[in-house]
Amino acid sequence: MKHSLRQHSVLPGFGLTLGITLVYLSVIVLIPLSAAFIKTAALSWVQFWSVVTAPRVVASYKLSFGASLLAAAINTVFGLIVAWVLVRYSFPGKRLVDALVDLPFALPTAVAGIALTALYAPNGWIGQYLQEWWGLKVAYTPLGVLVALVFIGLPFIVRTVQPVLEDLEGELEEAAATLGASRWQIFTRVIFPTLLPALLTGFALAFARAVGEYGSVVFIAGNMPMISEITPLIIITKLEQYDYTGATAVAVVMLVASFVLLLLINFLQWFSRKRNPAK
Amino acid sequence: MSIEIRNVTRAFGDFVAVNNVSFKVASGELVALLSPSGAGKTTLLRIIAGLETVDRGEILFHGEDTTDIGVGERSVGFVFQHYALFRHMTVFENVAFGLRVRPRRLRPSRETIRDRVQALLKLVQVDWLANHYPQQLSGGQRQRIALARALAIEPKVLLLDEPFGALDAKVRKELRTWLRRLHDEMHITSIFVTHDQEEALEVADRVVVMNVGKIEQIGTPREVVEHPATPFVAQFLNLDDHGPAWLVEAKIKHRGYVLAIDKKLGHAA
Amino acid sequence: MMWDDVGTAQALPAPSISKSAARRGAREEPVLVRAGLIFIALGFLLLFLFVPLASVFAGALRKGWEAYFAAIVEPDAWSAIKLTLLAAGIAVPLNLVFGLAAAWAIAKFEFRGKSLLITLIDLPFSVSPVIAGLIYVLVFGLQGWFGPCLYVHDIRIIFAVPGIVLATIFVTFPFVARELIPLMQAQGTDEEEAAIVLGANGWQTFWRVTLPDIKWGLFYGVILCNARAMGEFGAVSVVSGHVRGLTNTMPLDIEILYNEYNFTAAFAVASLLAMLALVTLALKTLVEWLARNQIRRDLA
């Protein structure tokens, strides 16, 4: 391999492992991904634009991105509370609750999808009360999409905030207390600023995951065009109609958005490492 | 502000950190709590600050029982061993913190805060670092800023927990002298905790020697060195039959009196 | 100096907080606030996490145990289970080998472009599963790059098992690598260099020195990779032919049953995957506990 590109090392295996890595990465990830861009490049700009800005598609963007944003925001607030409670307090069953927070990671999206749908349907355990008491319809509406996206984004904020909370020096709070700060002031001026980078990272991760989510949403969404149709579903619909070009064009839009988000997340993680250097 | 520690006891499970300790600190005095590591002196300091509770006993500030007075209300300046500076705030913001969090009616104006912070930073000789972040500074600088932050709230009592423990020997010596001079100017009742005998003897007006949560002896450095009350004190200060060699070499100057003992000490058997 | 005369006797200001607040110390909130926060946290989790989980099992057992078992051993469900296991059985080991190779190259050597490589490895995480399936259709589908060529040789990838396996590999691609890279980076190269100096060759160093150090991270990554592989829905849905008994994985089977209003059967299959998820979480907790104990023993 090109030894000029790396520092000399006594350990063997660089060539082999880097080779495997690059080949596997290219074959499985990079080349197939490029297929989407290459195919779309065959379109003229006008054609591309008309496909990705069709009213039905735009409505789906609003739903996918809007609901994802809102779900990530909800998860940020409640995820912070959950992380706080798990790190700072004790109560019976805490370890069980802590382990279960990862459930949305481990549970297949289809299972989550049908479970949430059954729950929030008009005759479901929760849905029936929502309907009776507040006339609220959740399943088969955009609200159902929101519920599903909150479910799958739930662990992200909790798991990014927990380590930061655990590492927080108690002495900082004690110092602030000796200086006369109230508990609320300590939280807003000392604790929260330290948590902010982790919160933002978790928010971005939850948002990115929610935007592309399909399995857990498609059952509860209702999937009515212009109202409760998410963008991934539009891609599938176009595929079923053999409109590969259209499907790919919309996919490219989503890919670009995902890459931007990925860069943002990496930047946030770099930023938070700068702000809170390890001791 | 005088301090009285009265029959204070504190245990953590089976481990008794502070065992029925009583002593008084006069207003404006600088007292050292001296003992080997892990012997409960930090716990006692934290109790005085209100950061720990007592199992038994009281802490009195100027005759008033402080048991029901909260940490933020005791007007105590606390300097932590590892500084506990707020990493996301500049040096200026750190020092200003205690003034900014006061309830509106008690809060000084922005200009007053600014002037006071700048005067303090100048006092501790780091005024040129006001806009830096703690990570960019050396240990000695951080410790001085921690002190300035504690002083900003005009505390009645100053408590320092092994303030120079995390610094290297040369910096420690410099800061030691500097702290003594600062105290001579300001006359705040101060208690500091250390396991370094030389430090305690050089800086303090009086030394409280502790061992496993109990007081072994209280006295001026001279008293403690010339008349150690128990074998532990003699051994801990290296005052055995063979003479306090390090004392002779160190020739600690304490208020004009040189603690360089070269005659045989009689001490309790 | 702007100082008040601090040395003389002055009374403390009258305390303005309650006695219980004073006794509480510097790091705790009032009891009511604590209870309130716990209530909110648990309520949120109940609504969005526990109840949905419970409803899967409730739905599966609604018609009793016989119906449950009948749904699971039904031939189509059974072949879905087999296909799911097959896809995971191929994807996980492949991604395992890749993860080890990538982590070795990234953690033990310095080279330019390293952070770009790490970002690229993370790519599948940020790609929607539907798009993951789509790109394989673009490459291997009838209208795709290799489509005509495959058609001529009567090799079917899309709408057949190989396509499902490929899509599964894609979506679970980063799991093991992401687990191992920070772990091996934190462990450094000292031990391996010591082994080389003592005369070990590359493989020996890897097996005897590196592998034992990373075993918990490896196990953890494999567990997560497997859980995702068996549960993948969106990507597989695109590349599968949705033919029951042939090209259906368990998640797809759930979808079909559900759309046929055969709720009990759908939940029955779903409950298997839910149990897998719970086992995954239990193993994850176990690994964390074991890893912590190992660290404690190492430091003792």
Image (cartoon, coloured by chain):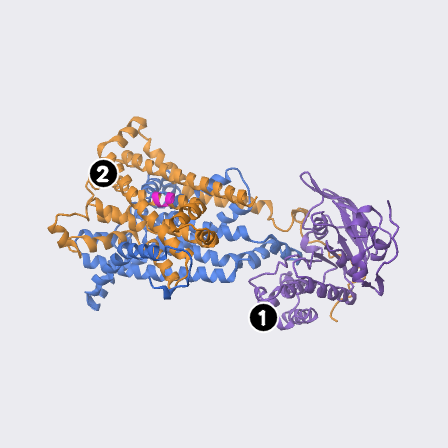
Range of magenta residues = C222-226
Mark 1 sits on what residue? B131
* Residue at far top of view: C66
* Mark 2 residue type: Glu
Relative horizontal placement of residue A277, taking residue A74 as reference (left or right): right
Q: Dot 2: within a 10 Å radius of its alpha carbon, few (fewer than 14), some, or many (20 or more) residues?
A: few
Q: CA distance from mark 2 to mark 1?
A: 68 Å
**Chain A palette colour:** blue
Chain letter, orange: C
Q: The N terminus of chain B is located in which quarter?
A: bottom right
Q: The C terminus of chain B is located in which quarter?
A: top right
Relative horizontal placement of residue B20, taking residue A169 as reference (left or right): right
- Residue A27: x percent and y percent? 26, 55
- Residue B225: x percent and y percent? 84, 55
Mark 2 sits on what residue? C260
The residue at 61%/54% (across/down) is A173
- Residue B25: x percent and y percent? 80, 54
Closest to the observer: C299 or C276?
A: C299
Q: Dividing the picture into quarters, in which one does residue A125 lie? A: top left
- Residue A203: x percent and y percent? 42, 56
